[in-house]
Image: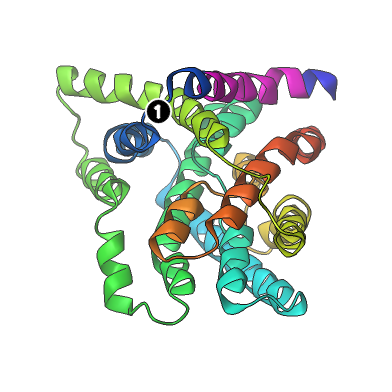
Amino acid sequence: MTAIFLDNLLPVLICASLGFVIHKRAQLDIRAISQLVFYIFSPCLVFSSLLKSEVSGAALARMTGFTVAVIGVMLLCGAATGWLLRLDRRRWATLVLSATFVNGGNFGLAVVRFAFGAEALSYAVAFFIASTFAVYTAGVFIAGLGRAQAGSAARELLKVPAFYAVIAAEILRLAGWTLPVALDRAVSLMADATIPVMLVVLGMQISASRLNALSPKQWMAVAASVGLQLIVAPGVAWLLAGPLGLTGAARQAGILEASMPAAVVTTVIAMQYDLDLELTTAAVVVTTVLSPLTLTPLILWLGG
């Protein structure tokens, strides 16, 4: 088990630690670097992974269905937990966001690639894309507490560059076309840089977090988020993988992606919709720090 941690999780944590240290020393602009990832690097990774993937369209569709199902179940679990904790409406929405959406991008893609290789990474990218769409639709609706309209959620989705990367990759795949060598190499270079840059940004975001001001009620909600993300979600994913037809690398990628810590993007949504930003940030930081304790045995089990 120690070897699994050292080979698959420690490289991820080292990259994030570099981001943590550089932010403490230089106070770099996290927003600017995050926008580079969002608008350039991430779309290139999605485009390159889908274009070069040998995974069939039907298999990708099954992974998308699995992702939607897991998110739906976790949304219900988060909503019920928030109600049982008697959270006010603002913190209830914050907990639901934190418990529902995982860090399938800057954390999950790296772990899946290290643990199970390129084929599993193709499925992990499909999970990442589907969960990104869900954040900007269901996530925005939850954050708005019923005030967000379907039209505004759809417009948010159309602002996600990865959406267009998916369309472009599928058009090229179906038409049997290839990119010019210069363009293909440029896209590949940026795609290869995506995961390391994402991990550095994650470390910077953790560095900028402030946990010392949380109230007991907020810590209770954080504890609930940790339990839902790191314990309940893997069980939900395992139960759904078989009935939804995931096997082999798809099963490994799907369950592992669903078991990741809370998504960093939830902090952006919390800020935009005036939710409990301290609670959201704490959920991201604590689930990220504790995730090796659950991911290490999970990788061992999935690889067995």
Residue 124 drawn above or below residue 87: above
Which residue is at a point 67% across and 57% down the rendered structure image?
A: 241
Q: Residue furthest front?
A: 213
Image: magenta residue range:
5-21
Which residue is at a point 57% across and 40% down the rendered structure image?
A: 209
Residue 167 drawn above or below residue 190: below
Q: Using residue 29 as the reference point, say whether residue 176 is left or right of it.
A: left
Display colour scheme: rainbow
Of residues 276 and 266, the one nearer the viewer is 276
What secondary structure is marked by label 1? helix
Is residue 259 among what the camera can see? yes
Secondary structure predominantly adopted by residues drawn in magenta: helix
Residue 116 drawn above or below residue 230: above
Which residue is at a point 30% across and 47% down the rendered structure image?
A: 166
Q: Where, quadrant-wise, is the C terminus in this rendering?
A: top right
Q: Using residue 282 as the reference point, say whether residue 20 is left or right of it.
A: left
Is residue 58 among what the camera can see? no
Q: Residues within 10 Å of mark 1 (few under 14, many from 20)?
A: many
Residue 230 picture location, percent across and down: 74, 50
Is residue 6 a member of the stretch shown in magenta?
yes
Q: Where, quadrant-wise, is the N terminus in this rendering?
A: top right
Q: Residue furthest bottom?
A: 146
Which residue is at a point 39% across and 34% down the rendered structure image?
A: 30
Query: Type of residue at label 1?
Result: Thr
Residue 137 picture location, percent across and down: 40, 67
Residue 250 drawn above or below residue 240: above
Q: Which residue is mark 1?
A: 194
Is residue 231 a member of the stretch shown in magenta?
no
Q: Residue furthest right?
A: 1
Of residues 217 and 12, the one nearer the viewer is 217
Residue 298 picture location, percent across and down: 78, 39
